[in-house]
Each structure stands twice: as C-alpha cells, then as structure tokens.
Amino acid sequence: MSYDFDRVIDRKNTNSLKYDFAKERGMREDALPLWVADMDFQTAPEIIEALHQEVDHGIFGYTEGKDAYFEAVKQWMEQSHQWEVKRNWLIKTPGIVFALAMAVKAYTEKGESVLIQQPVYYPFSEVIVDNQRKLINNSLININGHYEIDFEDFEKKIVDNDVKLFLLCNPHNPASRVWTRDELQKMGEICLKHQVLIVSDEIHSDFIYPGYKHTVLATLSEELADITITCTAPSKTFNLAGLQISNIFISNQKLRRKFRKEVDAAGYSQVNVMGLVACQVAYEKGRPWLEALNQYLLGNLNFVRTFLQEQLPEIKLIEPEGTYLLWLDFRKLNLSPEELEDLIVNQAKLWLDSGAIFGEDGNGYQRINIACPRETLKQALNQLKNAIEQR
C-alpha cells in the first residue's frame, strides 16, 4: 500500500493545539507552526478504520485492555526492540509526562534531588520543580555538533546532591541522540553504584535513522531492569497523542506497587477507550505505515540538511540519530535570546520551540518538527532564509 505523506491537510479550526492556539499562547496567529511534537499526517488507515468501528458501536463506557491488547504491545516490543516484557510489569497511563510526575512523587520526597540532562524536553524540569523536588542538571556537551555525556560530572552531581532519581531521555529530545549501549551501561552502572532509580522515557524509540539502533535500557542487565521504569507509547509513533495512552513497564514489584499507589492517589483508573483501540491496532497492523513514514522523514531530513548547507550555512544542523525533531544551532548569528526569538517569530513568521525552554543549555538553538509535508517544510525554510537575508 502507498501512503501520501505529501498531502497537506488543513488542521485549522479543529481545536488543534499546534494550529489553533497561537493567540492563547502569546504567538502571532499567522506564524507557521512547526513546534509541538505531533505530526501533520493522518495516522495509519487500519487505525482510522478501527476507530470508526468503535464509534459506530456508539457506547463509550469504562474500558480495559484484555489479552489481545497486551499481546500486541508485547509483540511490538519484541520485534522492534528485542525486549521481552511480562504482563504484570505493565501499568497504563494517559501519557508519559503523567508517568514522569507519578514517578517523581512515588520515588522521592519533597526537597530531594532529581537529575536530568539539559537541554531536555521541558516537562522533565516541570514535573520536578512543580512537585517541590530539587532539579539537578548534568549538562550535555556539544562537541562539534555532537552531544555527549560528561560522565564525571554525572557521577559528581549524583554524589554531591544525594540524587534519588534520574530522568533519562532515550532517544534524546531535543539533542536527537540515540544513546549507545556503552553510554547507557556507564550511566546505569553509576546509578547502581549510588542507588539511583532511573525513569527511561523511550517514546521516540521507533524513529531511528539509518546507522543507529535504539537500546532499551532495561535490556542491558537484570540489575539495571530492577531499578528502571521504562516509559513507552504509540502516541509519537502513530500520531495518537490526543488519545492519551502510554505503556509503562516496571519489572521490580516493589517499585511497581509504589508507582501504582501514586496513580491511584491521583484518582486515575481506566485509560481512554479510543487509545486502547488505536494502540492495539497500531501495534498489530501499523508497521508498513511506519516504515513508509520513516522513509519520508529521512527524505525531509535530507532536504533540511541540503537546504541549510546551500542556503543557510550559518545555521548548523545538529545531526540527528533519532526523532523527527531537529535541533538547529543559530549561535553564529550572534543574536541575544530575544533577538533570535524576534527573528523566528516576527520576521520569519515561524512558530518553533525556542531552545531556551529546554534549559539554559538551549540558548541560541531552536527545535523544529519535520513531521509535515515537504512543501510545508520548504515554505518554513524559505521564510527563515528571507528573514535572515533581510536582517
């Protein structure tokens, strides 16, 4: 089956966060949005058909996943990531950010330290600070356009601050790193040594570029699996974020009980019925669509790389290893954060994610979502080029 990822779908006036809430978020309404991490593509047709069948049934009562749901998830993890999961490890949540918050509350007390690696997805810091925990940052180091981990600082920050919990982003958003087995092993061994629990956000694990391979942290050893909470979801992979379904795996029974207790304390029980349907069908029938999508995204990446090299050499692409979110380095323009934001928003009329929201380490950068038709991407880059030329 062929899929038309070039088709431009009008998302305005659909209550889309990406397209319909510029004014509410302090953004000019004529800005082209390539910010939040959802895609401008319809999901796999098999998923749409299954959701139509559910709608036609017409009853949307409390719903749970049965054997077929878990088998679909289990098979996906085995085939995609060589990870054999067990049913009793699984706790379903309405999203991974919710799961991060539950983990912070389950495994730390107010005032205790939680480690992250900025620049990183901004809800990581929010769930720490908003729950009155102490945010500790092990800054990633940009070495010639490639982000690396300062392992000495990683361990020092853990020891000096008595860190209890580490929120890992793998693949990393926005640095687009797919951490190697060796890097994961080193971080894991330090966490084992100092009794630090790990929450591994692996939501982007189905978007890996050629030459790289995603490693599920919990597969490295039983010892690491025993201290790891692994967060997965079909939402990024199949553009299902609004259906609110995530699959959280915790093999350690004690940790699982603590996590479950926090979820219960939040008053949450059954997940969205449509999310259950979509996740199961996605993992059962969606692989051909995903494979075609990844080829299209690779084409978009190649287009951006070539455009920047030929038209905007002063903007450096941080070469991505995974995700459909590109991290662009604007520092050669020598603009203040305010000047850079003015260039992007008011002159180029683009709505990107400012690097500053990912932490101080993100100053001078912008994140752009390339999961859109190539014509949209071409329009965005031409607007950026014209704005820079007219400075």
Image (cartoon, rainbow, N blue to C red):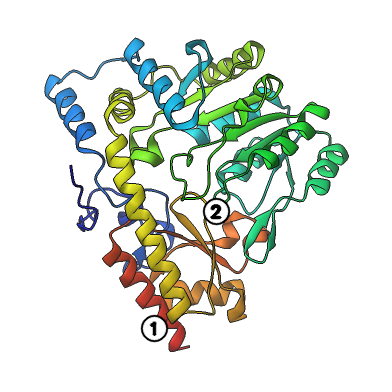
> Image height check: is 266 above or below 244?
above
Q: Position of residue 246 (x, y in %)?
A: 44, 29
Which amino acid lies under the numbered mark 1 shown in the image of this protein?
Answer: Asn
In the rendered image, the residue lying farthest to the right is 160
User: In the rendering, which numbered label is found on residue 174?
Assistant: 2
- Residue occupied by mark 1: 386
Please state the total of marks drawn on the protein image: 2
The residue shown at (51%, 10%) is: 88
- The reply to whether residue 240 is visible in this rendering is yes
The residue shown at (18%, 46%) is: 2
**Neighbours of disc 1 within 10 Å: few (<14), some (14-19), many (20+):** few
> Image quarter for residue 240?
top left
In the rendered image, the residue lying farthest to the front is 211
Q: Is residue 32 left or right of residue 338?
A: left
- Helix, strand or loop at label 2? It is loop
**Neighbours of disc 2 within 10 Å: few (<14), some (14-19), many (20+):** many
Which amino acid lies under the numbered mark 2 shown in the image of this protein?
Answer: Pro
Between the C-alphas of marks 1 and 2, the distance is 25 Å
> Image height check: is 162 above or below 171?
above
Of the pair 328 and 106, the residue shown nearer to us: 328
Q: Quadrant of the N terminus?
A: top left
Q: Position of residue 338 (x, y in %)?
A: 57, 73
The residue shown at (51%, 71%) is: 341
In the rendered image, the residue lying farthest to the left is 56
Q: Position of residue 298 (x, y in %)?
A: 39, 56
- Helix, strand or loop at label 1? It is helix
Q: Earlier in the sequence, mark 1 or mark 2?
A: 2
Q: Position of residue 144 (x, y in %)?
A: 66, 67
In the rendered image, the residue lying farthest to the bottom is 390
Q: Is residue 157 left or right of residue 197?
A: right
